[in-house]
Amino acid sequence: MSKKNDIRHGRHCVFKMHVHLIFVAKYRRKVFDADAINRLRTIFAKVCADFEAQRIEMDGEDDHVHLLVEYPPKVAVSFPALNGGAYRALGHMI
């Protein structure tokens, strides 16, 4: 059994924490086209790297975006930077 174990190690801890975030457009407007989702994918990857988190999966529809993130215990679950970065990048559309 030589399966690679993808549990992350900190200095004093071992962890594998995930959070499923859903970003919804105001009034569920249909604003997320393929171009917007690709821009969000880039923004979320950069913000996750800044917080030592890892974007596992991301997908979206016309009115919302799903994001699965693996993060270290020292980071708050709310991820205000993700929401702020998305709004600044796509604020003119929302």
Image (tube, rainbow, N blue to C red):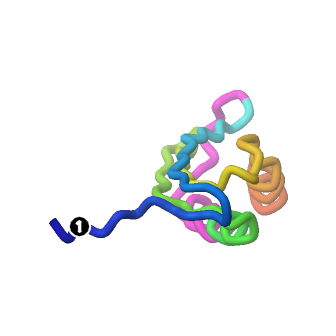
Residue 89 image position (x, y, % from top left): 78, 62
Which residue position is annotated with label 1? 3
The answer, for residue 92, to whether it is visible in the render is no
- Name the residue rendered at 20%, 71% in the picture: 2
Q: Quadrant of residue 44?
A: bottom right
Quarter of the image holding residue 43? Answer: bottom right
For residue 19, above or below residue 86:
above
Q: Residue at x 75, y 53 (%)?
A: 74
Name the residue located 62 percent from the left edge and 70 percent from the top edge: 42
Q: At which x and y percent is residue 59?
A: 47, 52
Which residue is farthest left?
1
The residue range painted magenta reads: 27-42
- Identity of the residue drawn at 67% across and 71% down: 49
* The magenta stretch spans residue 34: yes
SS at badge 1 = loop
Please give left or right for residue 4 compared with residue 91 in the image.
Answer: left
Quarter where residue 46 is shown: bottom right
Q: Could you tell me what secondary structure mostly forms the magenta stretch?
A: helix
* Amino acid type of the residue that numbered disc 1 sits on in the rendered structure: Lys
Give coordinates of residue 34: x percent, y percent: 51, 61
> Dot 1 surroundings within 10 Å: few (below 14), some, or many (20 or more)?
few
| Left or right of residue 56: residue 93 | right
